[in-house]
Structures are given as C-alpha cells and as structure tokens.
Image (spheres, rainbow, N blue to C red):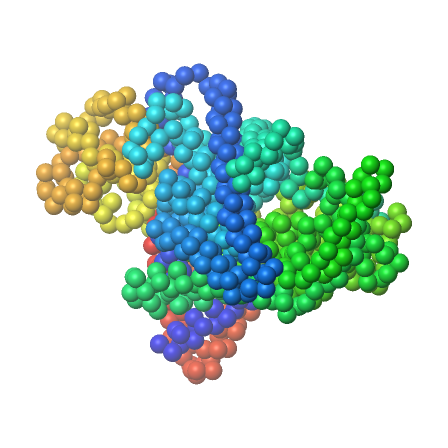
C-alpha cells in the first residue's frame, strides 16, 4: 500500500511540472472533482440525421431566411428593452440611496448617514440573495456556464424562466444597493436566456408551445440564437454592437459560421439601438424632454481627443505588464476565495445553516464597504479647489463639465470636474459678470476625492477617472485606498450568492492604477498643454489601465479593443489600447489561466479548448499527430443492437448513465458489432414508452415494415430530460423483470443517427480532437478495419488532463508495440516522470523487488483506466 501511495504522490507532483511559465497547462482534477465532471452530459451541435428527422424536414416549409432575420430582430429588441429596464432600476435605487446619504453627511450626521446607508442597502441585498437562494442557477455572472453550454455541455437550469426573473431582479438590487459589482456580466446571461426562450416559442415552465418558428426547435439553431443573445447582451450593456459580435466570436461561442456573423451583427444593432434610444429619453423612468430624445452618447464620453505620441508606447507597455500581473493576482485571489468558500460549505451539514452562511457573506461585504464609504473620506482629508466653470444649457459641453483652475500659475491647483463631492467640507460659489453672453461661476472651498469616487455607481466612478484635463483631481492616497478596497471587495463579492458581474470593477481597478501612473508622469514633467506632450494626461492613462487589467483577467484581445473604442469614442488611443492589451495578455498567460476558463475548471464543467495543448518537459508543445485515437479511447463499449429486445434496452438504460450509444448489427460470422450509427439515451427512453413499436419475436423478420415512422414527429421525439413522455425507472425495471419482454423487439433503424461520426483506430489523435470539437459531437466511435466498434471517445477523454494521463500510461504499460517516433515522443515528455517515480519507489524497497513493483504499477494503471470508463457521456 505504501508503494501505491508513493506512486500516486509522485504522479501528482510530476503532473504539476507540466507548466507554461508559472501556470499549469492542464488543470489536475481531484477524485471528487472528477465525479462532478463525470456528472455532466454532452450535447450534439447538429440534430441527429435519422429517418425521423428527415421525414420531419420534408414537412417543413421552404427554407427561407426572412424568419431567421425576424427572430434576430425580436431577440435584439427584447434584450434592448431588458437592458434599458435594468439600467433604469439600478439608477433609481442608487440615487435614492446616495441622495439621503449626502444630505446627512453634509450636516455632519455620520450616524444617520451610516444607518441609512446600511439599512437601505440591506433591504435590497437580502432580497437579492434570497432570490438566488431560491434559484441558484442565477448566481454570479453566468458567463462560465454560457461558455460551457455553447461548448457542448448540458448545464442544469441555466435557461429556465425562473432563472431569468431571478437574474434580473437580483442583479438590479445588488448593483443598485452599492455592492462592488457590475451588471454587464449578467446581461450576457440575460441575453442568452431571452434568446433561448424566444427562439423556441415555447415554455417548459408554463407548459405551453406556440405554433410559430417550429423549425428552429433543433439543437443547432437554438445554440446559434443563444450566441446571438449573449452578443446582444454585451451590445446593450456597453452600447457596443461590434464589440458584442466580436465578444461572442472570441470568448462565448465555440461554433461559428460566416452567415451567422451578419445575423448576430444585426441582432446587436437592434439591441443597441433600442437601449440607447430609450436611455436617451428617460433617466430613472422620468422623461428628460424632447431635447435629448434620440441623442446617442458613448458610455464614457471622451470630450477632448488628443494626438498620440510614439513615446506613449513605453508607459502603455508598462501598464500592460501591470495589468497582466494584477489581473493574474485577481484571478488567483478569486479562486482562493472560491476554494475556501467551497471547503467551508462542505463542512456545514445543516441546510438552513448553509443558507444563513450564504446570506451572511454578502451582508458582511456590504457592512465593510458601507463603513469605508461613510468614514474613510474623513480620514483621508480634503483637497482645496479654486476654479471657474461656465453655465451652459448643454450638459455635455466641455466648458460645462470642467471647472478650470482660477490660478493657473499655482502648481498645486488644477482643473477639476464640476460634479465633484464636497462631503462635509465648505464650499462657496458665486456668479461672475457675464462675458460674451455666458455666465461663469467661481467656486472656492474644498472637496473629498474619495467621496467623489465612492458616492455613486461604479460606472460614475469610472467616468470620473476617465476625465481629461483634470490632471490633479485625484491624489495617490485616495486612488491607492480605493484600489486596495475594490480589488479585494469585488474579488470577494464575485462568488457570493447574488447575481453580479465584475466588468465595471475591472474597469475601475485598472483605471485607478492607470491614473496613478499618469499622475506620476504629471508630477515629474508638469501639466503639459503643448500638442506634442498633451498625451501625458492621467485620464488617458486611466483608459489604458482599464483595458490592461481587463485583458489581464479575461485575456480578451480583439473584442476588448473594439468595445473600449466604442464606449469612449476615443479612436486616437487605438494603438496604445492594442499594445496594452497584448502585453497584458502575454504577461497573464505566463501566470494564470483566464478567469472564465479558470472558473470552468473550478466548477468542473467539461470544456474543450480550440486546440489541445500538452507541454513537453523542455517547454515545447507535444505533437499529438504522433498518436492515434486508440491511445485515448475508452473501452469496452456499451452498444445497442439495431434490432434490440425491450429487455436488453431496459437493462442497458438501468445499468449505466451514458448519454448515447453506438448502434451495431451483425453482418455474419466474425462480423459482429458492426457500426451503423448512434442513438441517444433520451431517444431510447422515449421509445420505451411506445409499446406500439414493440415487435414480437415470432413476427420478426427483415421484411417487417418500420411502424409509425411518419407518426413520430421530430420535435416530439427529441424530448427534454424532464419530459413526462420518457420511461421511468419503474417502467424499465418492469421490462427487465417480466420474461415476456425478452420476446419483444424494437427496430431502431428509423431513429438511429445515420451520420454518427466514427474514425479508424489508427486515426490521428490531433485530427480526431479537431473533428470532435469542430463538429460539436457528443461522442466519437472508434472502429477497426472491419468497421467493428472497438472503443469510443467522449468529451472527457479529450480534455487535457485525461490525454496526459493516458499517454503516460501508454509509456508505462503499453497495450501494443509502439512505433519509434511515439516512443521517443513519450520518453521526451514523460521519461523524467518515470525515472523520478522509480527513484521514489527504490528508496522504499530493495532492487530485488522491482518485478513486484512493475506488477503493482500495471495493476494501478488498469485500475485508473477502469475509472475513466465511468464517463457519463461514453
């Protein structure tokens, strides 16, 4: 036993050496995590190409595209309305909170301000958390779950009507009450929810199906519309239609077609137009007036565009490195909080106790943040202000929003924004005689830098940081204090039981250290007003800091570049934005995985990357073309005969949880198990509820007509897992116990997927992976030269850690003679692991026991291989 334990320890230790930089290439799952991983089932991207499906297709109307464009417009409009409602509710909740808080603070009544802030916020926060406790699928941003689903993994409850309602209300309450989170992430999930329901025109919650758009009720179209909904969610939240399209292509979707790009772009355009035209007319559901109707504005207006100097590339690179480092630290800290939270909840036994802990965690964060908001500005102190601004009717005028320093010769004085917070400090304002018909207001007093950043939503704080020509509006102390607070608070809040995202906190955190770098340059070289040096503005560096931190956390590139240009309208910064993003991505890739992919690994959601990456010990990538499909396939395989007895099908369904099975038939002697297609578990359970399809053995012949094929329509045949038309375990057990059903058979040929993908056992592993992921398969059958089923490859078999383990076992205990190239590749990648393991074992046993050691290693390898065969997808 000690030898086996030492071997497992050494394997785990050596698996961690498969690194790129300082991060592991493939996550090493524990036994508990593998059980969760195996509980997920895979989905087919394309509908099964069976006779039932072909009959259903023949009865559909001509395949025109106008209805598809109409559906995209409906989804875009619905998501745009949802984004408008969410934004307005958040504004109402936040404004009511901060209006009274500022009123109490201006009178110096800290106690009343604190009690109002905490009491008011707790009402909405408790409501938000209670809603998520009712529907846990609405927790968090939902982005990892959407990515996993669109990659081909079935995830429970993420597209239910209850999830939509809870997600919307919980997000509005959590963001509006002042938690350090944002709503842009949940908008992606909300957009996907709207698309999932609208495109099918049916509801499982209300048990109704409308007779419209029936031809979209298949897996391919549904997944394409969900991708469009996710893109529309980004477009509505940011006002960035092109960025939404690129985000869906780059991060969310795993399957994409050129034709889909135009349709998703149209959907994003409708969503952005709907949200912007409503937001231009209303604020807090109050009509602004005809002067603002239809006036579209960027999310963060950049009022003073400036030329970019080539020298600015150097600080852009510096910010990219900082973004990669801090972004990786943010990802790591997020995972630390998640693991500690998971370990704590595993120790809690009572259901009600667990709910109280989940409810208490966001409350603790709110108390901490509220205390900081009320009392910390008083500790930091005030900043003097002596400036003049112009009263104009246009609220977006440069002169209206910048209060210019009255004494420009003083180094300590600089421009500030007009809408700053004075906290408890006195300030006087008086009008100056009109000059050229304009009224100027002179302001003299003090303001609070921290209160200006704290009092309002996260978007308003980002707006302050991006302001230009306000070089010294914020000092190092206030920005550093907020950076530390928001870094930890937003990271902690991201995994709690509320619906929230971290997009705005990421922009805010990056904007803080970016503006600090810009302020450092201003302190060194002074406020520059000449055209050649005007780029040295803290507001411009705040934008670069935001994109660098965003890229360091998510590793987005193209979509992030376009989104930031769209929301700021600052095209002059494009080159610097690209540089900061790329440097941040390269730096972050050396340290951690991207946040959303790391959360997929933490939640044990099976996910296939575009290409498998296995690193050799010398740092190069292992070429999987040297290996074949049989090297990683699972065998033996559970199959079902094309003419199967009811008893055997019931036994098969009760005996395992596999999601699909190869369909085989016998072509004669020594030609058993000949592959002829695939059939899913749901389809078999559906057939078991149709006794009219059962054929007596005495009547069974090759000439028997396939009954009722035209009567079983495709939408009714492809049922959901919770459908009442599926055979229950009690019914299946009855089929097994009664000998009568041994003489009843089912002809599976009309329901078999005739286009099930199979590959030869000598097929390249690299190409098998690409084929599996590109086609969006549930499983891939492996056959020999006689087309007989010898194994199967599932999603779990193709995950990086599974390939690593199977290739290592291939070197230790090869099932066949390996070619020279394969042996050299294996030894180069795993040879040092084997030598280290042998050295570890030799320390415990004498050299004379090497034979026994090999036996134990072989037995352990076979045991590990048996564990792999428990995959639920087969």
Q: Which residue is drawn at 60% across and 41% down?
A: 238
Residue 677 seen in the current view: yes
**Horizontal arrangement in the rendering, residue 808 relative to residue 105 (left or right):** left
Kindly identify the residue that appears in the image at 37 percent across and 45 percent down. Answer: 157
Q: Where is residue 234 in the image (x, y as percent from the top left)?
A: 56, 40
In the image: residue 811, left or right of residue 379 = left
Residue that appears at 71% across and 58% down: 427
Pick the residue in front: 153 or 208: 208
Quarter holding the N terminus is bottom left
**Occupied quadrant, residue 48:** top left
**Number of marks in picture:** 0
Which residue is located at x 55 percent, y 57 percent? 101
Residue 790 in the image, given as x and y percentages of width and height: 37, 46
Q: Indicate the quadrant where residue 274 lies.
A: top right
> Does residue 609 appear in the picture of this structure?
no
Q: Position of residue 8 (x, y in %)?
A: 43, 70
* Left or right of residue 299, residue 414 in this image: right
Counting from the top left corner in percent of width and height, residue 637 is at 33, 48
Q: In this view, does 204 lie above or below 39?
A: above
Examine the rendered structure and indicate whether residue 63 appears above or below residue 156.
above
Q: Which of 779 and 98 is in front in this view?
A: 98
Q: Which of 375 and 714 is in front in this view?
A: 375
- Which of the 4 image quadrants contains residue 823? bottom right
- Viewer-nearest residue: 826 or 245: 245
């Amino acid at each position: 036993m000690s030898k086996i334990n030492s071997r497992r320890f050494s394997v785990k230790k050596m698996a961690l050496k498969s690194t790129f930089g300082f991060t592991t290439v493939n996550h090493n799952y524990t036994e508990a995590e593998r059980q969760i991983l195996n509980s997920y089932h895979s989905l087919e991207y394309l509908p099964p190409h069976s006779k039932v499906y072909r009959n259903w297709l023949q009865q559909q109307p001509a395949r025109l595209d106008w209805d598809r464009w109409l559906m995209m417009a409906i989804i875009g409009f619905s998501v745009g309305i949802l984004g408008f409602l969410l934004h307005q509710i958040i504004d109402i909740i936040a404004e009511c909170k901060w209006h009274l808080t500022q009123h109490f603070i201006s009178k110096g009544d800290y106690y009343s301000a604190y009690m109002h802030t905490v009491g008011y916020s707790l009402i909405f926060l408790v409501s938000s958390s209670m809603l998520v406790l009712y529907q846990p699928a609405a927790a968090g941003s939902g982005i990892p779950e959407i990515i996993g689903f669109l990659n081909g993994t079935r995830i429970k409850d993420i597209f239910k009507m209850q999830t939509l309602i809870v997600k919307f209300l919980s997000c509005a309450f959590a963001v509006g009450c002042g938690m350090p989170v944002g709503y842009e992430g949940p908008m992606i999930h909300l957009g996907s929810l709207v698309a999932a329901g609208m495109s099918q025109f049916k509801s499982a919650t209300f048990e109704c199906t409308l007779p419209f758009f029936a031809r979209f009720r298949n897996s391919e179209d549904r997944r394409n519309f969900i991708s469009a909904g996710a893109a529309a969610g980004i477009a509505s939240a940011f006002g960035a239609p092109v960025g939404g399209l690129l985000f869906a292509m780059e991060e969310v979707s795993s399957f994409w077609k050129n034709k889909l790009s135009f349709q998703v772009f149209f959907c994003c355009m409708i969503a952005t137009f709907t949200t912007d035209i409503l937001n231009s007319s209303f604020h807090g559901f109050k009509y602004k007036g005809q002067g603002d109707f239809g006036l579209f504005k960027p999310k963060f207006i950049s009022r003073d565009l400036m030329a970019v100097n080539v020298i600015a590339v150097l600080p852009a690179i510096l910010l990219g490195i900082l973004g990669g480092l801090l972004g990786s630290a943010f990802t790591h800290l997020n995972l630390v909080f998640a693991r500690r939270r998971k370990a704590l909840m595993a120790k809690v036994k009572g259901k009600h106790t667990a709910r109280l802990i989940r409810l208490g965690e966001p409350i603790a964060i709110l108390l901490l943040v509220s205390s900081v908001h009320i009392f910390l500005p008083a500790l930091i102190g005030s900043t003097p202000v002596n400036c003049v601004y112009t009263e104009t009717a246009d609220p977006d005028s440069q002169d209206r929003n910048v209060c210019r320093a009255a004494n420009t010769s003083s180094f300590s004085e600089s421009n500030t924004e007009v809408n700053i917070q004075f906290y408890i400090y006195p300030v006087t304002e008086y009008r100056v005689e009109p000059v050229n018909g304009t009224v100027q207001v002179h302001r003299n007093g003090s303001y609070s830098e921290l209160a200006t950043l704290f009092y309002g939503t996260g978007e308003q704080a980002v707006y302050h940081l991006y302001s230009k020509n306000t070089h010294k509006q914020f000092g190092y102390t206030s920005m550093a204090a907020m950076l530390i607070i928001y870094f930890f608070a937003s990271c902690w809040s991201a995994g709690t039981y509320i619906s929230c995202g971290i997009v705005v906190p990421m922009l805010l955190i990056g904007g803080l250290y970016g503006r600090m770098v810009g302020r450092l340059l201003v302190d060194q070289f002074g406020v520059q007003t000449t055209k050649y040096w005007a780029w040295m503005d803290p507001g411009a560096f705040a934008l670069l800091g935001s994109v660098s931190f965003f890229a360091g956390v998510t590793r987005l590139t193209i979509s992030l570049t376009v989104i930031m240009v769209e929301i700021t309208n600052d095209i002059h910064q494009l080159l610097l934005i690209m540089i900061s993003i790329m440097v941040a991505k390269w730096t972050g890739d050396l340290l951690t995985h991207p946040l959303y992919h790391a959360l997929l690994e933490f939640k044990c959601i099976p996910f296939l990357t575009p290409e498998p990456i296995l690193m050799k010990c010398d740092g190069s990538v292992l070429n999987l073309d040297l290996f074949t499909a049989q090297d990683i396939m699972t065998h033996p395989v559970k199959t079902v005969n094309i003419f199967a007895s009811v008893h055997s099908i019931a036994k098969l369904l009760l005996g395992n949880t596999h999601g699909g099975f190869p369909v085989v038939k016998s072509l004669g002697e020594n030609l058993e198990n000949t592959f002829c297609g695939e059939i899913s578990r749901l389809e078999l359970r559906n057939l078991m509820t149709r006794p009219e399809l059962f054929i007596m053995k005495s009547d069974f012949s090759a000439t028997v007509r396939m009954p009722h094929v035209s009567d079983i329509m495709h939408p009714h045949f492809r049922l959901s897992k919770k459908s009442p038309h599926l055979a229950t375990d009690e019914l299946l057990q009855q089929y097994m116990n009664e000998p009568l059903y041994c003489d009843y058979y089912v002809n599976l040929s009309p329901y078999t997927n005739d286009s099930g993908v199979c590959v030869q056992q000598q097929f390249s592993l690299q190409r098998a992976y690409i084929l599996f992921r590109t086609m969006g398969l549930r499983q891939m059958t492996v056959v020999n030269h006689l087309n007989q089923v010898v194994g199967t490859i599932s999603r779990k078999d193709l995950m990086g850690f599974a390939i690593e383990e199977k290739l290592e076992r291939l070197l230790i205990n090869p099932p066949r003679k390996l070619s020279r190239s394969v042996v050299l590749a294996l030894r180069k990648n795993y040879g040092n692991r084997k030598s280290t393991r042998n050295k570890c074992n030799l320390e415990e046993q004498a050299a004379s026991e090497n034979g026994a050691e090999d036996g134990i290693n072989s037995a352990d390898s076979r045991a590990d291989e048996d564990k792999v065969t428990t995959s639920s997808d087969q």
